[in-house]
Amino acid sequence: MTGSTLAAKLADARRRHQLIETLEHADIPADAPTAYAIQHEMLRESDARIGAWKIGARAPDALATGAPIDAALVHVSPARLAHQSFFRVLVELEVAFRFAYALPARPDPYTRDEVLDAIGGIAVALEVVDSRFAQWPNLDPLAQLADSQNNGALVVSGMEPYDVVAPGFDFLTPRLEFTLDGESIAPAALGNPAGDPRELLPWLVNHCSRMGLTVEPFWTITTGSYTGAYRIDGPGMLHGAIDRIGELELVLA
């Protein structure tokens, strides 16, 4: 336990769909380990189970960060969600992975080769970015990290075999489409700030291992935006496709 009341406040904000108006200084996590602990306290407060993870980095050589996603917030495409079920809606198009088998916690770190060899599936993912804090985005980054790194929901396409898609696939700048009501919302310059998103996976596996968690093969792991975040202010239909992987659809009603 962290000694912070933030986990209970975040769980209550989700349950009641009511923003946290003021972030008390005492509730700002002291460091990243505290923020990660609050993530899991919040899941326990919500009686939630992990169905996915979001991970990312600001640059290829930057430290990765991540957050577990409540299984109730993971949706298979085509999905239909109420726009009003979020506090605000920003959307990102991403690539997601699943492992072919479980990777249990262990004393020794997993190597890069062990992790990449365990990848079993690949999919298109659409993350809805949201926050439980009224003052977002003018908010301490550690508080955002504690708040599931601003995750609101995740929509995922069908999972394709990784060993079929990966050979020759451009993980840096894949060909993609991202539209809102038929109009493109993809920027001219595409790219994941972390570079090749697969390089984030060893961090996640070892992060979970240090916390005593087994990485489960049913977890969907989304790995950062190729398109940046695009704000959606009302109902609409989103369509995303990444060449050779698949496509997805989200209707915001």
Image (tube, helix red, strand yellow):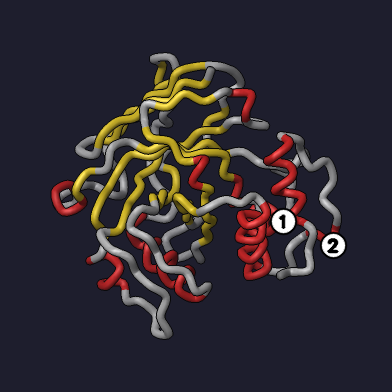
Q: Residues within 10 Å of mark 1 (few under 14, many from 20)?
A: many
Residue at image position (19%, 51%) is 166
Nearer the observer, disc 1 or disc 2? 1
Q: Earlier in the sequence, mark 1 or mark 2?
A: 1
Q: Position of residue 43 (x, y in %)?
A: 61, 54
Q: Amino acid at mark 2?
A: Ala
**Residue under pointer 2:** 26
Residue at image position (52%, 49%) is 69
Q: Is residue 109 visible?
A: yes
Q: Element at badge 2?
A: helix
Q: Position of residue 171 (x, y in %)?
A: 28, 49
Residue at image position (42%, 55%) is 194
Label 1 vs label 2: CA separation?
Answer: 12 Å
Q: Quadrant of residue 13?
A: top right
Q: Position of residue 41 (x, y in %)?
A: 66, 60
Residue at image position (38%, 39%) is 125
Height in image: 62 above or below 163? Answer: below
Height in image: 132 above or below 149? Answer: above
Height in image: 112 above or below 14? Answer: below
Position of 169 with respect to 27 (left or right) is: left
Which label was assigned to residue 7? 1
Residue sticking out furthest to the bottom: 107
Q: Amino acid at mark 1?
A: Ala
Q: Are marks 1 and 2 in contact (CB under 8 Å)?
A: no
Quarter of the image that includes the N terminus? bottom right
Q: Residues within 10 Å of mark 2 (few under 14, many from 20)?
A: few
Q: Position of residue 9 (x, y in %)?
A: 77, 50
